[in-house]
Image: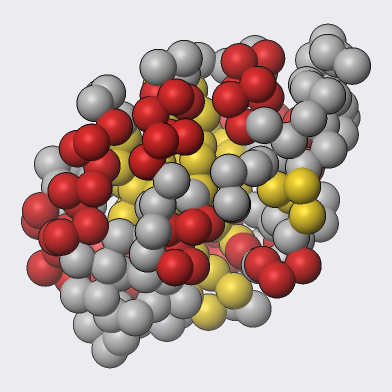
Amino acid sequence: MDGKAVAGKSGKREEYRELETVFACSSDPVEIAGNLPFDRLYVADLDGIMRGTPDIKTLGKLARIKRLMVDIGIEGSEDIEKLQNIGCDIDIIIGTETLKDIETLGCVKDPIVSIDIKDGRVISRALPELPETPVEAFKALRKEGITRFIILNISAVGTLSGTDSALDKILKIKENSKIIVGGGLRKEDIERLKIKGVSGALVGTALHKGFLGFPRII
């Protein structure tokens, strides 16, 4: 947000502050990304999600050093064109929070759809096309041919509170879907989710506070 990495907390974006991390001495997203021990990173561009003005310059720098999954707050097909200026191969995330209509899903080849959940309900501008309950929204998106998902509990971001029952219900019916989970994850949650067949985990707070056991940079 505004060219800096920020620490999220329960989706209260007006309270987000610059990220303090064991992987860098600053909140520069490029410096932090270069020090992270992963080949693939998830990036939520809050300038794009909140204001429709994604930071393409910073995203381009990040894409040259890491493989990215990027959420720029896609509303419709016109927003997808903005990502073409990055000039690198990225995985496009379409978040239910900003998606205006289901038809936009067909404009991206094999998108990752983020089911954005707050206070137990799906946040979506595509209502009533997309149900508010997480399980029903997952089923509806499956019918649209979506096979790659992020289940993001925005209420839990930054809290280290673990997962909730809605996720367990989705995992029981996931079939061949690839699911990445985010929001409040702790080290013990990652091991448990791996056993349940989850494809990946989005980890912020536990990682940047040094709770996952990776060597500290600072």
As drawn, the residue found furthest toward the bottom would be: 128
Q: Is residue 91 left or right of residue 119?
A: left
Q: Residue at the spot x=44%, y=68% of the render? A: 51
* Number of marks in the rendered image: 0
Locate residue 186 relative to residue 37 in the image: left or right: right
Q: Position of residue 38 (x, y in %)?
A: 58, 16
> At x 46% / y 18%, what residue is drawn?
66
Q: Is residue 52 above or below residue 17?
A: below
Going by the image, does 205 lie left or right of 124? right
Q: Quadrant of residue 59?
A: top left
Residue 178: x percent and y percent?
A: 36, 39
Q: Nearer the viewer, residue 59 or 157?
A: 59
In this picture, is 153 found above or below 182? below
x then y, percent, for residue 74: 30, 60
Q: Nearer the viewer, residue 124 or 18?
A: 18
Residue at image location 47% in from the left, 34% down from the top: 58
Q: Residue 67 in the image: x percent, y percent?
A: 41, 21
Residue 196 is at least partly visible in this image: no
Residue plotted at (10% across, 56% down): 106
